[in-house]
Amino acid sequence: MTSTDLSPIGLTATPDGTLPCAVCGIPTTGSKAKYPVLSRIVPMASGERLEEMSAGAGIDLPTCSDCQGIAEQARTIVSAHRGLVRLLGTVATWQTTTALYALDTIGQPLPGPDIEPHRLGSLVHRLASPGAGTMYSRRFSPVMLADASTKFSARERWSAVDPVALADCRSGFLDWKADGRPIRALAHPGRRRCEWCGTATFPGRRVSEVWFGDLCAKCHAVQEAGGTSYEAMWEAIDPDRAIRRRRPYVPDIDGVRPYSQSPGGDGTPWSHLGGVLALHERVKRLVEAS
C-alpha cells in the first residue's frame, strides 16, 4: 500500500527511524512512553472478535515537540488555576491538556494562563473528552484497532483523527463559545409563545436550553415533574412556596387557562391572565377571604 493509497484517511508510510507521535500522529523521534494494550480487534470472515492481550502488553510511542509544547502550556495554565485542581483533583492537568488538544485539532488558538476561571472550567467540561479521542495512541490503546500499525503515521498534524472525534471537537468548541455569551432574552425558534405561560422570550445562552418544544424552560421543568399548566402558574406566583406551605390546599383561581387556550397579553409570562403581579393580588385576596 502506498502513501497515495492512504491519503484519503490521512495516513502515510512512517519513515525509517521514526514512529507516529502518540498525540497528533506525525512521524517523530525522541523518548517514548508505553501505552497499555488490553485487547485487540481481530478481523474475521464473519466480522470481528476481541482478543485479550497478555498482561503487560503495550506499545511505545514518542510525542512530537509541538504536542509536548501543548502539554507544557496546560501545566502552566493549571499552575495558575489552583481552583481547578481543587475541583478535579489529580486529573486537572490531563483534562486541561486534552482540551487543548481538541482546540489544536480544529485549528483554534490556545488560551494562556490568564484565561478566566469560569472559562477554563467550561473549556475542560466541553473539550477534555473530545480531545482525548483525537490522540493517535487511541488506535492502539487500550484496544488496538484491526488496522492499527506503527508502519503508518499521520500525513500532517491531526490528519488521521477519526471524523466522529473531529465532529465532537467542533461541537464541543461551539458549546464552549456559547458558554461565554452573556445571558439574553431568547425567542422561540418558531417565533411562537410558550403554550402555558405565553412568554415570548426566555433568558439564556442557547435556544436549545430554554425552549423545549412549545414550552419555555420553566414550564417544561414543571411538566417534567408531572405538573400541569396550573401548577406552572403557581410556581410563578409563589416561587418559594410561602403561600402553599401554610395552607392544606391550593386556592382555586377561577378562569385560569394556559396561553394555548386563551391567547393574548404582551409576551411576558402569564400576561394573558393579567401578569404575575395581578395573579398574586388575586391569590392574596382569596387567602384573605378564606
Image (spheres, rainbow, N blue to C red):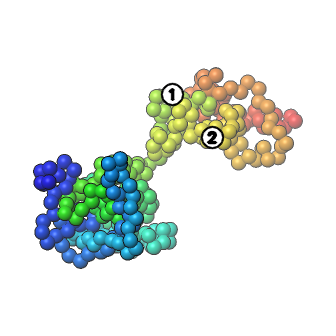
Residue ID for mark 2: 224
Q: Helix, strand or loop at disc 1? A: loop
Q: Is residue 13 above or below residue 57?
A: above
Q: Earlier in the sequence, mark 1 or mark 2?
A: 1
Instruction: Say which amino acid is labelled 2.
Output: Glu
Q: Position of residue 273 (x, y in %)?
A: 66, 27
Image point (82%, 46%), residue name? 246
Q: Is residue 71 above or below residue 123?
A: below
Q: Is residue 287 above or below residue 193?
A: below
Front residue of 17/73: it is 17
Circles 1 and 2, Cβ within 8 Å, touching? The answer is: no
Instruction: Say which amino acid is labelled 1.
Output: Arg
Location of the C terminus by quadrant is top right
Q: Position of residue 154 (x, y in %)?
A: 20, 58
Write down the quadrant of residue 24 in the picture.
bottom left
Residue at the bottom extreme of this rendering: 31
Whole-Å distance between the Cαs marked 1 and 2?
21 Å
Whether residue 85 sits left or right of residue 66 in the image: it is right
Residue ID for mark 1: 192
Whether residue 76 sits left or right of residue 200 in the image: it is left
Image point (38%, 55%), residue name? 49
Q: Helix, strand or loop at disc 2? A: helix
Q: What is the crowding at mark 1: few (fewer than 14 residues within 10 Å), some, or many (at least 20)? A: some
Image point (56%, 40%), residue name? 217
